[in-house]
Image: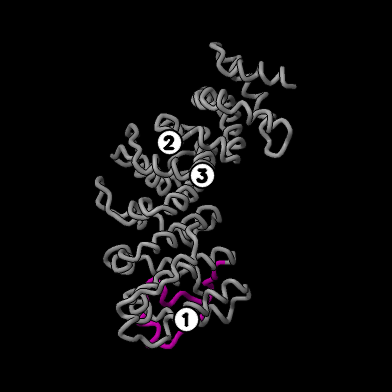
Amino acid sequence: MEEQLNELVDFLSNPRPDVRELAASYIVGFSHPGSDAFAMLKARAEKIVRPLLVICHETPIAANNAASTLVNLTTDKSVCRLFADEDSLAMIVSLITIPTSDIADTTCMLLSNLTKIDSICRILATLNVGEVPGICNSPKALDQLTDVFVKGMDKKYNKNAKFSFLASVFADITNHSFGRRYFLERTAYDGKMPITKIMVFSEYPDLIRRGGVDSTMKNVCFEKDKHPDILNPKETNLLPYILLPLCGPEEFDMDEMEAMPEEVQLLGEEKKREQDPKLRACLLEAINLLCTTHFGRQTLRQKMVYPILRELHKADDDETCLELNERAVQLLMRDESKETTVDEVEDANEFEEI
């Protein structure tokens, strides 16, 4: 098998396209994680990553096999590090943003594997690529990825792709302050904050898309100095999109309801809460993070977040969610002293960026 694999690796760089395509069709069978063949293929990763990236730009069959192999290989972080350069990442971004790409979704999965590596997140955050007709007039890779994520839902940009796995990329990028600042600051090409473009998917049916968006919303709340903008209805206005998945069909007293964000008022009898307890916990962590500043706590009190948490607590049966809910309620219902209006709650690090 070793000899056969060595031959396949050599064939990936063969000058004949038909030979490269045939090699890619065979080598994908060696790439299943956990198998003995995977270990042998991983040992040759330095020789095959670049040829496979090149094949991703060739015929649809060859590209699909090459991209699938790369997705499988990058489940191992040691392989991911081989992509930590601008040229490789630019090739990957182009495979996602070209509207005729047959492997855009597979490449989104590849990028979501790669952004588990800090160095790759740093390169991607500053990466410039060629502009693509049909999406934003910006050379910034993150601008293009955000735009295609929004425009590409339900296969509206590319008939072969939904781009949902880009939400996981955004969640990874916002594990870092530079990524959070990107999503919370206005872009040069349209003057809008990227977080405002993706937060609208917090109740989207696709679990991967809304899960990554929920994590991104939570992560940006680590930026304490941005809490005034995050909670400003005329700026980011993030709060309603954190609260909406936590709301059910309950009716509130008029005084309570009128103080709530308009987006969560009068939701109707058919309103359903987020069913995934991990995503509910993520959103509750976001609320707890907003409670780590005096400004955040005061705003959440004024916006009547407590009644929403109260009704959620009655309906929830997940221990983690109940604990996070109770912690947020304690912060919101406690009396403020001179010290708490100046000093911030110092437990933000308990909520890991995810």
Residue 99 in the image, given as x and y percentages of width and height:
43, 35
Q: Amino acid at mark 3?
A: Ser
Q: Nearer the viewer, residue 200 or 217?
A: 217
Instruction: State the residue position of label 2.
Output: 93
- Specify whether residue 114 is painted magenta: no
The crowd level at tag 3 (other Cα within 10 Å; few <14, some 14-19, many 20+) is many
Instruction: State the residue position of label 3.
Output: 112
- Disc 3 to disc 2: CB gap under 8 Å: no
Which-is-in-front pick, marks 1 and 2?
1
- Disc 1 to disc 3: CB gap under 8 Å: no
Going from the N terminus, do you reach mark 3 or mark 2 first?
2
- Specify whether residue 259 is painted magenta: yes
**Secondary structure found at label 2:** helix
Does residue 162 appear in this view? no
Residue 202 in the image, given as x and y percentages of width and height:
47, 61
**Secondary structure found at label 1:** helix
Residue 329 circle label: 1
The part of the image, by quadrant, that contains residue 44 is: top right
The part of the image, by quadrant, that contains residue 333 is: bottom left
Query: At 35% from the left edge and 85% from the top edge, which residue is drawn?
Result: 336
Q: Amino acid at mark 1?
A: Val
Going from the N terminus, do you reach mark 1 or mark 2 first?
2
* Relative to 186, 88 lies left or right: right
Q: Give the CA distance from mark 1 to mark 2.
A: 43 Å
Range covered by the magenta-colored residues: 249-274
